[in-house]
Amino acid sequence: MSMDSQKATYTSPALEFKSSTFSVPVLVLSNNDLLVIEQKLQKKVELAPEFFKNSPVVIDMQELNKQKLDVDISELATVIRKSGLLPIGIRGGNEQQNKAALALLIPIYSTHHSVSNNNQKQKAVTHPPEPKTEAVTTTLITQPVRSGQRIYAQGDLIILAQVSAGAEIMAEGNIHVYNTLRGRALAGVRGDTQTRIFCFDLQAELISIAGNYKISEDLNDSVRNKPVQIYLQEQTLIIKDIE
């Protein structure tokens, strides 16, 4: 081994943290009956077993706590794992629930950022920054997206070829598939509810906009195998023919 290669080995970093974005399902609970939760989860997983298998999930406790309904976090995590899902976080929990989650090595996700008094005073006397205009990037794919492939676009995503079953395409902006869409398509993955999905032939396994999704079994036969646009209206996915 040469001295140059030895030096490169010693100076290379052992690890590196990088910023990234992932689309993770959020399980919003409105019932604290563990038997009911288990039954509902099993039915949902049975509809799309390959999609939900070993899928990470964040537990949302806000609705339960609004209703003042408590649940044992340890038992809840067991039920979720039994269904084949992997709890990777909790949000909207109270102090006791958060403590129980941390004991299970489940991280806590904050639903809002608190601002100290000092920051508020400073904000009052600080001039607002100049507005910035950011160019929206568009990713163009001309080759078929095959099973097992995953594509992520920071802006809009345009695909001129078919998207095969088992493939996953994600975009922070809109998604356009000028061919058959058989895989999973997730638009607005960073929460933009104004994004849309357009395709020439809808046969998707899953479609999602800003975390609101439908799986294949939820799609009406009247919207299959035809050009459609998909958008969000009052937290409901609307599928409409392209005229």
Image (tube, rainbow, N blue to C red):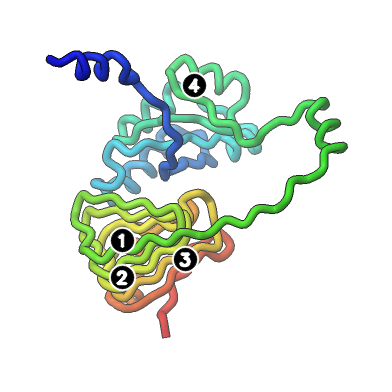
Q: Of discs 3 and 2, which sits in the foreground?
A: 3
* Crowd class of label 2 (few under 14; some 14 to 19; many from 20; radius 10 Å): many
Tell me, yes or no, whether the two marked residues, 4 and 3, touch with CB atoms within 8 Å. no
Q: Which residue is mark 2?
A: 202
Q: Callout 1: helix, strand or loop?
A: helix
In the rendered structure, which disc, 2 or 1, sits on the residue that comes first in sequence?
2
| Label 2 to label 4: alpha-carbon separation | 40 Å
Q: Amino acid at mark 2?
A: Leu
Q: Nearer the viewer, residue 43 or 88?
A: 88
Quadrant (top left/top right/bottom left/bottom right) for the C terminus:
bottom left
**Image quarter (top left, top right, bottom left or bottom right) of the N terminus:** top left
**Mark closest to the chain's N terminus, 3 or 2:** 3
For disc 3, the marked residue is 196
Question: Disc 1 marks which amino acid?
Answer: Ser
Residue 202 in the image: x percent, y percent?
31, 70
Q: Residue furthest bottom?
A: 243
Q: Amino acid at mark 3?
A: Arg
Residue shown at 36% from the left, 66% from the top: 158
- Which amino acid does the dot numbered 4 rest on? Ala
Could you say whether the residue bearing mark 4 is in a helix, strand or loop?
A: helix
- Pointers 3 and 2 in contact (C-beta within 8 Å): no
The quarter holding residue 225 reads: bottom left
> In this orientation, does residue 156 appear?
yes
Residues 87 and 140: in front is 140
Q: Nearer the viewer, mark 2 or mark 4?
A: 2
Q: In this image, 162 relative to 104: left or right?
A: left
The residue tagged with tag 3: helix, strand or loop?
loop
Residue underneath mark 1: 216
